[in-house]
Image: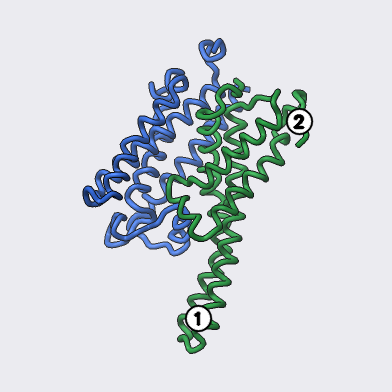
Chain colours: A blue, B green
Amino acid sequence: MTWARSRWVLAFRILLGGTGLLPWIMAGHRSVLLEAVFGTTCHRMPERSLLLGGVQMLVCSRCAGIYLGLLTGALMPARLWLASDWAVRHTRALALGVALPMALDVLTQDLGWRPSWHPARLGTGWLLGLGLMLLAVAHLRGWAEPSPESIRA
Amino acid sequence: MEPVTSQDQTFGRFGKHILIGALISGVASGIPLLNILNCCFCLLNMAGIVLALSMYLKSAPGDSVSMGEAAGFGAAAGAGAGVIAGVLGLITSRMMASLLTSVLSNAPAQMKSQLAASSAMGVIIIPVDAVLYAAFGALGGILGMALFFKDRKRA
């Protein structure tokens, strides 16, 4: 049972990791099809997107960070401290913690307090993608391999 | 809605609500201008799935949902939403293309063929859209369950 559940966790990591990999593996290459697909989940404004080899990425720099975070989270060892029972117990606080820097970045940029800055967009997006991916893996792992502590809870 | 009995523990018990989630997310994601909200971490897709999940939990007060089931619920509803959004996008682009070609009757042949090609590409986009929406849907199912319905979580 646990083994079968672990395979579902792996499938989830492959699905999300593969999704996260796509904009990065396609960086520097043009694909009209993928531009249309990713255009449904990202504004793809040229001034807010990274150019690699003179070609605009499939998503804006913030989304590129989020996708990189999903990929990083999918590749990280599942037994990392953030993907633990502790993380499961503090899900709301952790989710807020990883979303707050991006919210501040969006707010200060869209209120015109400072110009759009790719490193901030990329970094805060990466933190959100990574944090949410690790939280999701922690919850799924708790389901696949319940620890005595989580069973008691 | 009929309450789900506690004996019914198969994944099939989510069928109706997966469809509801797919419809809510897909239709919202297929509406021009409203679909801009998807630029915020696939918000419409995730919100539709969380809403459908909450509707299921309300309809089955005695039932609980495991994280694996929540992920499956989200992935299935997300895939459906991707298909619905893709079909709606295809219809919208076909309508726009026919409108443009009728308004611009003297438009160059190259422009007309580009419009036809872009609406034809909509068909190829649908399965890729379904996979992308399924991925975010699975994430939305897990996070929705963890953030909003943790008291209904089953080990």
* Residue at the image point whose x is 48% and y is 89% from the top: B106
Q: Residues within 10 Å of mark 1 (few under 14, many from 20)?
A: some
Q: Is residue A50 left or right of residue A84?
A: left
Image quarter where the N terminus of chain B lies is: top right
* Residue at the image point whose x is 59% and y is 52% from the top: B26
Q: Which of marks 2 and 1 precedes in the sequence?
A: 2
Q: Are marks 1 and 2 in contact (CB under 8 Å)?
A: no
Identify residue for label 2.
Answer: B3
Q: The disc labelled 1 sits on which kind of residue? A: Lys
Image quarter where the C terminus of chain B lies is: top right
Q: Quadrant of residue B16?
A: top right
Question: What x and y, as percent, mark residue A80?
Answer: 39, 23
Q: The disc labelled 2 sits on which kind of residue? A: Pro
Question: What x and y, as percent, mark residue A67?
Answer: 40, 44
Identify residue for label 1.
Answer: B112
Q: Is residue B57 left or right of residue A139?
A: right
Picture layout, residue A89 above or below residue B38: above
